[in-house]
Amino acid sequence: MILPRSALPTTPVLIEGIDVLALHGKLLVRARATDGATGYAFANSRLDVLLPILQRLVIPFFVGKDARDVETLVDGVYAHQSNYKLAGLAFWNTVSHVEFALLDLLGKLVDKPVAALFGPVLRTEIPIYLSSMRRDTTPEEEVAWVGERLAETNAGAIKLKIGGRMSNNADAWPGRTEAL
């Protein structure tokens, strides 16, 4: 990520606090600047089990720092208090929520969508593929479902799960992979 300094506020944006809020059964991460500006990030469904990492190891590193340095801060939190020992999805998931909330805060301060902080629009459409995460369907059911979604979306490709979950490539049931 490279945020051009010219896209950011010209004065420091000191992070006063970062909170986790509940809204209609979902979690949000809110970043607050000392001037009252706020930014929000919708949390994924696993943040509730990761709250101790977020609240004890990640948030304290960001508080009091300049949000305009978000790129450097994301790198710095990794080494802070031996956080590198937690390398992996659980740690970076919490960091990403803070990063998104800070980017939202910065975008609001310059009255631009977050995407504009990264530079000009390079394309207005992107190619997509469909992914089916199911393993409990028959090959015929899976092909029918994916076929319907392809017709609806005009996706350029598909990705199907084959083999059983964490099964060293053993099929979910015999012959499913070959049939797909």
Image (cartoon, rainbow, N blue to C red):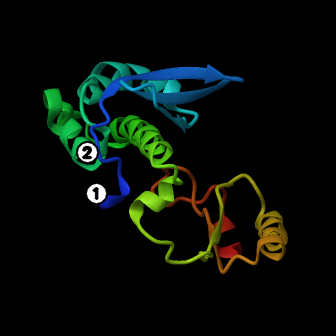
- 123 on left or right of 35: right
- 77 on left or right of 170: left
- The residue at the point 40 percent across, 34 percent down is 94
Image quadrant for the N terminus?
A: bottom left
Q: Which residue is mark 1?
A: 5
Camera-side mark, 1 or 2: 1
Which is more toward the observer, 20 or 82?
Answer: 20
On the question of residue 175 being in view, the answer is: no
Tell me if mark 1 has few (under 14), some (14-19) or many (20+) residues whose alpha carbon lies within 10 angstroms of its own: few
What amino acid is labelled 2 in the image? Asp
Disc 2 secondary structure class:
helix
What amino acid is labelled 1 in the image? Arg
Q: Position of residue 168 (x, y in %)?
A: 45, 56
- The residue at the point 48 percent across, 43 percent down is 104
Q: Which residue is mark 2?
A: 69
- The residue at the point 51 percent across, 72 percent down is 121
- Work out which residue is located at the far bottom of the displayed protein and give it: 156
CA gap, disc 1 and disc 2: 9 Å
